[in-house]
Image (cartoon, rainbow, N blue to C red):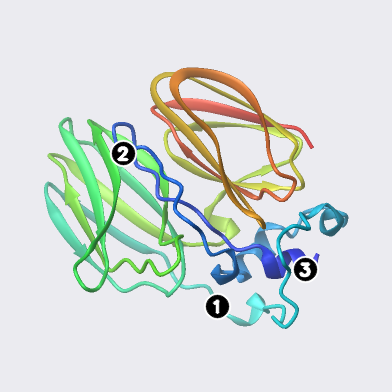
Amino acid sequence: MKKIIVLFGLVLVLLSACGAKEPTATPVDVSALQTSVVQTVVAGANKTATANAPTRTPKPTNTPVPTPTNTPLPNPLNFNGQGDNIIDFEKWDAPAVLHIKNTGGGNFAVWNYDKNGNKIDLLVNTIGSYEGYLPLDFLDKERTTRLEIKSDGQWTVEIYPLDIQYLHVLDLPGKYNGNGDDVLVIRKNPDIAQFDCQISGNFAVWAYGASGRDLVVNEIAPYSGRVILSKDTFILVITAPGSWSVEISK
């Protein structure tokens, strides 16, 4: 289990809401990812997980096992407003999860920027009301310090540290019903995943594990299909236009 803990970093791609650009295969530096969160996430995993981990990825030998219990979690950041606005903030130097809500009826878009004023990504780009969970700064060297909001209504933004108390979790085998963009933690080794999304629009799923990430679904819904997940998968990032479900065996 300690080998998996050292290897497992939370790597995610920033996926936009319905109508945003299609995901691209940006290289991911697995070794540079946060490990303390993974200790919490995989706490309920099988003791046999180490034997099931892929062997094709070189395993670091000199990296000490982190002790997250000695590091207090940062507090979530909360913002709310109305209409177009700019949010400047300083967060912890690690990935996070965004929870965004919007009640407007027109175009709603969210861009993130780094400290030098460079645009990083279009996180949300949709029409009308929106609610979703999105990864923030999960790619190496991304450090968001500003969000640009485009809205004709009221909105809220919550920025959570990557801890299991703030994430949606699926213990396997099991089924999860979601709605819109989401970040889902998988506990125990997965095998086959059945995805269903009957709302018209782009439906995409990225799976992340010790060996990297894999775009397992990228279709225009309605969609229903079964895919194989790597045994070391522990995070799914979903982009969906509405309600969806996943049922995973192990």
- In depth, the one of 224 and 42 nearer the eye is 224
Question: How far apart are the alpha carbons under marks 2 and 3?
Answer: 36 Å
Disc nearest the viewer among 2 and 1? 2
Which residue appears at 69% of the width and 80% of the height? 63
Disc nearest the viewer among 3 and 1? 3
- For the C terminus, give its image quadrant: top right
Check disc 1 and report its element: helix, strand or loop.
Answer: loop
Residue 175 in the figure: left or right of residue 213: right
Q: How many numbered discs?
A: 3
* Disc number for residue 92: none
Check disc 2 and report its element: helix, strand or loop.
Answer: loop
Q: Are marks 3 and 1 in contact (CB under 8 Å)?
A: no
- In depth, the one of 7 and 167 nearer the eye is 7
Residue denoted by label 3: 3
Rendered location of residue 216, percent (x, y): 57, 36
Tag 3: amino acid? Lys
Say few, some or many: other residues with alpha carbon within 10 Å of mark 1 (under 14 / 14 to 19 / 20 or more). few
Tag 1: amino acid? Pro
Residue denoted by label 2: 21
Question: How far apart are the alpha carbons under marks 3 and 1?
Answer: 23 Å
Among numbered discs 2 and 3, the one appearing first in the sequence: 3
Residue denoted by label 1: 72
Tag 2: amino acid? Lys
Q: Are marks 2 and 1 in contact (CB under 8 Å)?
A: no
Whether residue 5 is situated above or below residue 172 in the rendered picture? below
Q: Would you identify the image quadrant in which residue 62 lies?
A: bottom right
Rendered location of residue 207, percent (x, y): 59, 44
Say few, some or many: other residues with alpha carbon within 10 Å of mark 2 (under 14 / 14 to 19 / 20 or more). some
Say few, some or many: other residues with alpha carbon within 10 Å of mark 3 (under 14 / 14 to 19 / 20 or more). some
